[in-house]
Image (tube, helix red, strand yellow):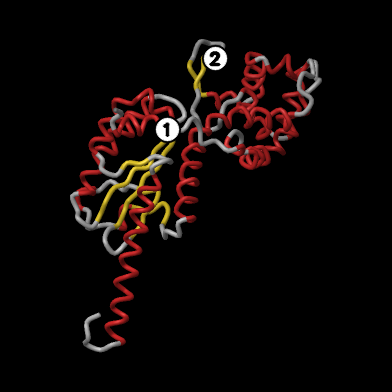
Amino acid sequence: MSTPFEIFLSQLSETNATLDYFTDFKKIKENVNKIAIKLNQLNYLIGKTDIKAAVNELYEENPKAFEVLDILVAIRKNKNVKAFNNKGEIVILDSYFTSPESICEYIEDTGLGEVFRNKEVKNLVDYVFGIEVGLDTNARKNRSGENMAKAVSLFFDKANIFYKKEVSSKEFPEILSLGVDVKRFDFVIKTKKKTYLIETNFFNGGGSKLNETARSYSDLAPKINKYETYEFVWITDGQGWLSAKNKLEEAFNTIPSIYNLTTIKIFIQKILNIYSKNTKRSSINILKITHGSRSI
């Protein structure tokens, strides 16, 4: 016979991806638009056989156009990426964009010089749009969590459960055990009986993040649950957990209220039962007021 944890594992979903999960075109378009003017100016280099002369001409016209050269090799700005220069020194990538000489070194040594001379790229705005699509795959893990929060909110909405999203732990100063560290809970549901502080996540793949999350919530839950009017709830899913099931099982045995997208209905029913009891009590109180001192 399967244990409750084994049943929990068997219910984990393969994916929570919707079609908009794969690429965030709105964000990509915004990123490209921010630097489109400079990219259009760099288009001047395309087809030039004498890259050095073209760089000097463009630098004289607008030296700031070269500030976006890093994205042409799929490097994000402000990452403080470092590389060896032709003198064997370790330098920050941005330092290449400060003079025509170092710009030419960057263009030639990265291979961009041949790309420009051979017209292998027709338009740098379109080229960077493609680069942004590729880089956006790194954000999918975040979107997986966002999709999970969206799914949970849909469950709550369908059940007419009132909740607040992204609530700071500062809102609950009476929970002294949380210490000075500020935490932000994905959802908070407040009833007359208890206030439920809820975290949600979804893991498609493995990694150290899963163990860290399970350990963190195993520590967090007792700190909250020690207060009679508060309860920590963890709603998690994804077959990424199969690679960290030992740590998840520890959390499963530590945290009383842990659910997945299959068992979330149990938590929802729990909340609805509390709502129902409160409604009945309200009805009784109204009858008592209506009928004076008679007990109903």
Of the pair 142 and 70, the residue shown nearer to us: 142
Circle nearer the viewer, 1 or 2:
1
Residue position marked by numbered label 1 in the rendering:
12
> Whole-percent x and y of residue 130?
68, 28
Q: Quadrant of residue 211?
A: top left
| Left or right: where 211 falls relative to 85 | left
Other residues around mark 1 within 10 Å, as few (<14) / some (14–19) / many (≥20)? many
Task: State the residue at coordinates (59%, 33%).
Answer: 22
- How many neighbours does mark 2 have within 10 angstroms: few (below 14), some (14-19), or many (20 or more)? some
Q: Which residue is mark 2?
A: 85
Residue at x 32% of width, y 31% of height = 212
In front here: 256 or 137? 256
Farthest residue to the bottom: give it. 292
Q: Is residue 126 something one can see in this rendering?
A: yes
Give the answer, above or below, for where 122 lies relative to 271: above
On the image, the x and y values in percent for residue 136 come to: 58, 32
Image quadrant in which the N terminus is located? top left
Q: Nearer the viewer, residue 288 or 239?
A: 288
- Viewer-nearest residue: 65 or 226: 226
Question: Along the horizontal axis of the image, is 49 left or right of 76?
Answer: right
Q: Is residue 179 visible?
A: no
Q: Position of residue 32 (x, y in %)?
A: 66, 37
